[in-house]
Amino acid sequence: MPDFRLRVFQSVARHLSFTKAAQELFITQPAITKHIRELERSYAQRLFERRGNRVSLTEAGRLLLTHADAVETLHQQLTDQLHGLHAEAAGRLRLGASTTLAQYVLPPILPAFQARYPNIELTLYNGNSEQIAESLLYGHVDLGFVEGQVKNRDLHYEPLLDDELVAVRRATPVGPPATPMPLHEALRHPLVLRERGSGTLEVLEFALRAHKIKMSDLRVALYLDNTEAIKSYLEAAADCLGFVSKQALKKDIEAGRLEIVPVQNLTLARQFEAVWLQGQPLAVPARRFLLYAQQTFSQP
């Protein structure tokens, strides 16, 4: 976007936090404040209400945000078209990925992509599947990667990679059970689960529903918002089970910190999917990354 002050404004408006905007843009908080004050003087309008530690948009701020988003979209389209004249992939690419994808699946493939397309400015945002869908709808990310069962009709989903959730616990001296644990026995353990809105919890909920088991019937020790926290909790808890993607367990299994517990009659297969706005073509950087990811994950 040509005017950096508008980018600063959008970041503050998105996070409703001067501190988080400073962290996202890698500038100081006083610099954030300076840019916002310059915009407010330029438009002779207050853009934010500040009450203690809380920040909210004024009516003028909401109007500016609508137009700033439109200006950003037009600028990106212009950039894509100009670079497309000589077949060069360049511009900004904002990826959004649910936790498992952002922590374990996408980071290993990013360096090779950046080496191939050095003129693409790449950012990866992390959130649960529900948050990534919302970010796409509000135009905060260009291409998303999610898992889960629930779909938004305003978004287009495309399969990317197969995955499986497994029950896991702290490694024991005797090792994993020799035979799969009965489902009713597994569910008697205190469970450590992902938070509402996560694709991981959705998959578990749908699978249990087939057995006529409600989430309210479970003995939940704790809900946590990321897989690393679940694994750390399980390492310290003697009798708990968690449900985690196999993608997230390789190093922990090899190191002998955790072990997989097979459970009878419980299949937790799922797909990681690429997602973007329904009916809208992807810009050049997003198209290049999607093709690159599809080719990478299709290799044996």
Image: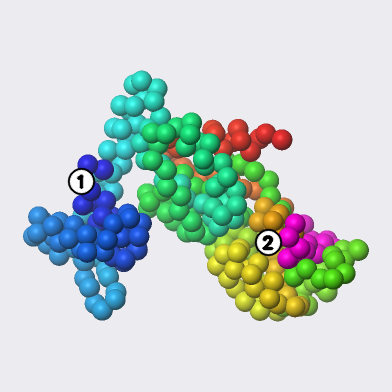
Which residue is identified by label 1?
Answer: 3
Q: Residues within 10 Å of mark 1 (few under 14, many from 20)?
A: few
Instruction: Find numbered disc 1 in the image and state the secondary structure of the residue it sits on.
Output: loop
Who comes first in sequence, dot 2 or dot 1? 1
Check the image and report above or below for 216 versus 56: below
**Left or right: residue 226 compared with residue 176:** left
Residue 5: give x, y in percent of width and height.
21, 52
Q: Residue at x 40, y 29 (%)?
A: 89
**Res 167 → quadrant:** bottom right
Residue 100: give x, y in percent of width and height.
59, 55
Q: Are marks 2 and 1 in contact (CB under 8 Å)?
A: no
* Viewer-nearest residue: 168 or 187: 168
Image quarter hosting the N terminus: top left
Q: Which mark is residue 86?
A: none
The verdict on residue 259 being magenta is yes
Q: Residue at x 76, y 63 (%)?
A: 256
Q: Quick check: can you spot residue 284?
A: no
Q: Which mark is residue 244?
A: 2
User: How far apart, in angstroms, are the residues tagged by discs 2 and 1?
Assistant: 43 Å
Q: Residue placed farthest to the top in the image? A: 86
Check the image and report above or below for 227 versus 163: below
Residue type (three-letter) at the residue carrying disc 1: Asp
Residue type (three-letter) at the residue carrying disc 2: Val
Q: Residue at x 42, y 43 (%)?
A: 122
The verdict on residue 12 being magenta is no
Q: Quick check: can you spot residue 276?
A: yes
Here the colouring is rainbow
- The span shown in magenta is 254-268
Q: Residue at x 27, y 70 (%)?
A: 55
